[in-house]
Image: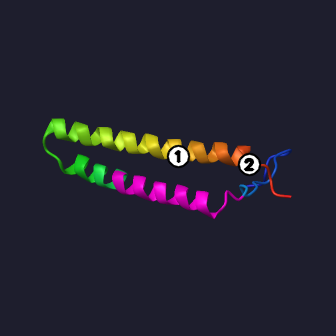
Amino acid sequence: MAPEAGSRPPQAPPDLGPDLSQAFHRLNNQLGVILANAELLEARLSDDTQRARAGLVVSGALDAISAVQELRRLIVISVPPAR
């Protein structure tokens, strides 16, 4: 599909530095572990109350992942482009 008229090609985000990028990567990995295990529990539990609690953990993990993505986006926006 051809790009729309007037649209700019996507640009790589500015470098956040190895320490910050690594911290985001580690945080996303840990949230992924929490999410995967909560989803497994939610699927396997037979007690409605326990399944609902596991569902809350799933929702919380998804919210946290979204918050990390938003934080990274905001940091990238505030970092001036390299010259």
- Secondary structure, magenta segment, majority class: helix
Which amino acid, mark 2? Answer: Val
Which amino acid, mark 1? Answer: Val
Which quarter shows the N terminus? bottom right
Circle 1 sits in a helix, a strand or a loop, which is it? helix
Relative horizontal placement of residue 64, taking residue 49 as reference (left or right): right
Colour mapping used in the image: rainbow
Give the crowd class for mark 2: few <14, some 14-19, many >=20 residues within 10 Å: few
Question: Over which residues does the magenta segment extend?
Answer: 15-34
Quarter of the image where one finds residue 29: bottom left
The question of residue 29 being in magenta is answered with yes
**Vertically, is 47 above or below 32?**
above
**Vertically, is 77 above or below 11?**
above
- According to the image, label 2 marks what residue? 79
* Residue 72, horizontal then vertical, whole percent: 61, 48
Give the crowd class for mark 1: few <14, some 14-19, many >=20 residues within 10 Å: some
Which quarter shows the C terminus? bottom right
Relative horizontal placement of residue 72, taking residue 81 as reference (left or right): left
Separation of marks 1 and 2 at Cα, in angstroms: 16 Å
Residue 4: which disc?
none
Rendered residue at 18%/40% (across/down): 50
The question of residue 1 being in magenta is answered with no
- According to the image, label 1 marks what residue? 68
Rendered residue at 16%/37% (across/down): 48
Relative horizontal placement of residue 2, taking residue 69 as reference (left or right): right
